[in-house]
Amino acid sequence: MRYAFVALCIFIVIFCAARLAQAQQPLDVDVALVLVMDISDSVDGDEFALQRVGTAGAFVDPEIVNAISSGALGRIAVSVVEFANEAVIVVPWTVISDAKSARAFAATVTGAPRSNDVGTGTSISAGISLANKVILTMPYRATRKVMDVSGDGTNNTDAEGITVEVVTKIAKAQHITINGLTIGDDFGLEEFYEEDVISKPGGFKLHSDTFKDFTKALRRKLVREIS
């Protein structure tokens, strides 16, 4: 009886240790995606609302939910960063695996207030720099790491002197793919994203004529990024 009790205790210790080790393992996801969104002075209140609602609408779309759940692991992790002169995290890492978790993420996106005290300029470099940090410190193990940069203007200021060239090189070194979504007809906008923002090779850019078309463009983009 005594030996049976000792054996039981040993089994319990081993079982608990195994469960603890399992709990400490990072969660595997198909894609770790950071949405990097422009909220500079060129984005007015109505355009900001269309951007937020468009993001929420894209993620609850059945086609997107199906693309997520059809992945090898059936889940992705998403975070949202906004930038002007500076960048901030608006939505922390959220795992999406089904319609319910997609709706929860969408509600968080639409419910978050517009970031204040981030300036009025357009520092794409600040957005990418923060997104790099968000991905490098994430509590997940991702098959693919993707950054989705959207905006209606070119970079006109650098955070702490760090250029777009520098932060995109950092992303490339960490095997992070940067894709782009340009909005509107600002002079040189699409060329800037093509030449200076998206990853080469591997990255791609889509265009939306107006913020009203943002949902449709983002949905097309997400299908490519998630599938």
Image (cartoon, grey):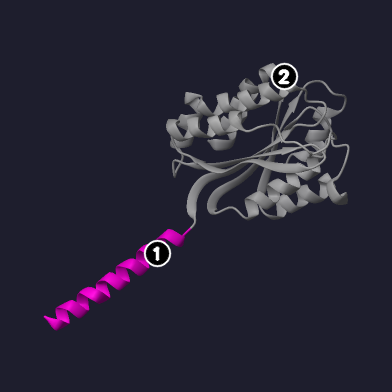
Of the numbered discs in the image, which one, if any, rests on residue 109? none
- Residue 70, horizontal then vertical, whole percent: 44, 36
Q: Residues within 10 Å of mark 1 (few under 14, many from 20)?
A: few
**Residue that sits furthest to the bottom in the current view:** 2
Q: Is residue 135 visible?
A: yes
| Residue at the spot 21% in from the left edge and 74% down from the top edge | 8
What's under tag 1, amino acid-wise?
Leu
Q: Which label's residue is closer to the chain start, 2 or 1?
A: 1
Q: Which residue is mark 2?
A: 46
Circle number at residue 20: 1
For the residue labelled by badge 1, is the local secondary structure a helix, a strand or a loop? Answer: helix
Q: Is residue 65 magenta?
A: no
Look at 30% across and 67% down and name the residue there. 15
Q: How busy is the neighbourhood of tag 2: few (under 14 within 10 Å), some, or many (20 plus)?
A: few
User: Where does the image place residue 152, in percent across and percent down from the top left?
Assistant: 79, 27
Q: Give the residues drawn in magenta, as a range.
A: 1-25
Identify whether 95 is placed above or below 15.
above
Main secondary structure along the magenta-highlighted residues: helix
Q: Residue at x 41, y 65 (%)?
A: 21
